[in-house]
Image (tube, grey):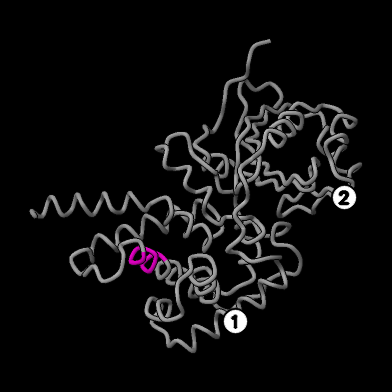
Amino acid sequence: MTSAAADERFRDAFDEHRRSLHAHCYRLAGNVADADDLVQETFLRAWRSRAQYEGRAAIRTWLYRISTNVYLDHHKAAARRTVPAGDPLEWCTDIGPYPDSVPSEDPQSGLVARETVELALIAALMYLPPRQRAAFVLRDVSGWTAAEIADALELAVPAVNSLIQRARRTIRRHAPGDPRQWRRPALTAEDEEILRRYAAATDPASLRELLADDVRITMPPDVPVIGIDAVAEFLTRPLDWRTFPSAANGRPALICYLRSPGSDQYDAMVVDVLTIENGRIVESNAFVGPHHVAAFGMPAAVPAVSR
């Protein structure tokens, strides 16, 4: 095989695993922008060392190993840090939504639906220092053995087992269930109808029909809004929004644009991810900033519609 053909084969192999690798990097980093950077650095490191790849491990495993070490290299200074009390979805601005699909990608982008990117897990991972987070994700989400993780992280197996056990104790305190089972079912017609009504609601009474009594809005770093009356009042403030339905982290979502008074356009502002249980919205996780909207392949602004 010629060098050019080998290089092309490498690019094809990387592209085949890019989406899965990106989801892995998102679990480590917690947001799409940082995951993008990790994937790019992974490609560069893998490209430079492609001649040394011996094929003893699957190329996906090799790429996961590289990306995990890229993440650890970027977070060496974070090994010792103080984590605030409370739900990270309320205070952590490093967490962002993960699109179920992006329009510009090929049909295989839907494969992310089978990846574990549940927001509760992503939030719980914020409590873990980098090495624990890496070991936990590789073991309990990706299904690696302790020996494989030890080889990837250049640690002894007992050290890896210790990292995993400490991480599991922390995760159990902050997130329910088995992370390997956190693959949310496909959105239902009821979910889509509730999302449609939520986007169209302009008065508190209409919203109350959709909200659980103990509904919560998180919008870090702002204080959360809690309770049906407070949330209904908050969401019906006289602002000029334009919204687009989407899905993120296996949940219904709205891409929200805000128009300033006198402006001829709506500017990208918020990705609003909803949790629906028993036909009611129990939580809205609002991620503020145009960079979150951009992660969904949406523009920075849309023109105002003449009326």
As for residue 64 lying within the magenta part, the answer is yes
Please state the total of marks drawn on the protein image.
2
Of the residues shown, which amino acid type is indicated by label 1? Gln
Identify whether 34 is placed above or below 248. below
Going from N to C along the chain, the mark reached first, 2 or 1, is 1
The residue lying toward the viewer, choosing from 159 and 287, is 159
Q: Which residues are magenta?
A: 61-67
Q: Residue at x 75, y 44 (%)?
A: 276
Left or right, residue 45 beside residue 221: left
The circle drawn on residue 214 is 2
User: Residue at (47%, 55%) from the top-left corner?
Assistant: 35
Q: Is residue 73 above or below residue 93?
A: below
Q: CA distance from mark 2 to mark 1?
A: 34 Å
Q: Amino acid at mark 2?
A: Asp
In the image, is residue 60 part of the stretch drawn in magenta?
A: no
Q: Quadrant of residue 236?
A: top right
Q: Which residue is mark 1?
A: 165
Q: Residues within 10 Å of mark 1 (few under 14, many from 20)?
A: some
Q: Quadrant of the N terminus?
A: bottom left
Residue 180 x %, y %: 57, 63
In the image, which is nearer the foreground, mark 2 or mark 1? Answer: 1
Where residue 260 appears, as percent x and y from the top left, is 69, 28
Dividing the picture into quadrants, the one containing residue 198 is top right
Q: Position of residue 202 (x, y in %)?
A: 82, 26
Element assignment for label 1: helix
**Seen in the image, is 109 located left or right of residue 48?**
right
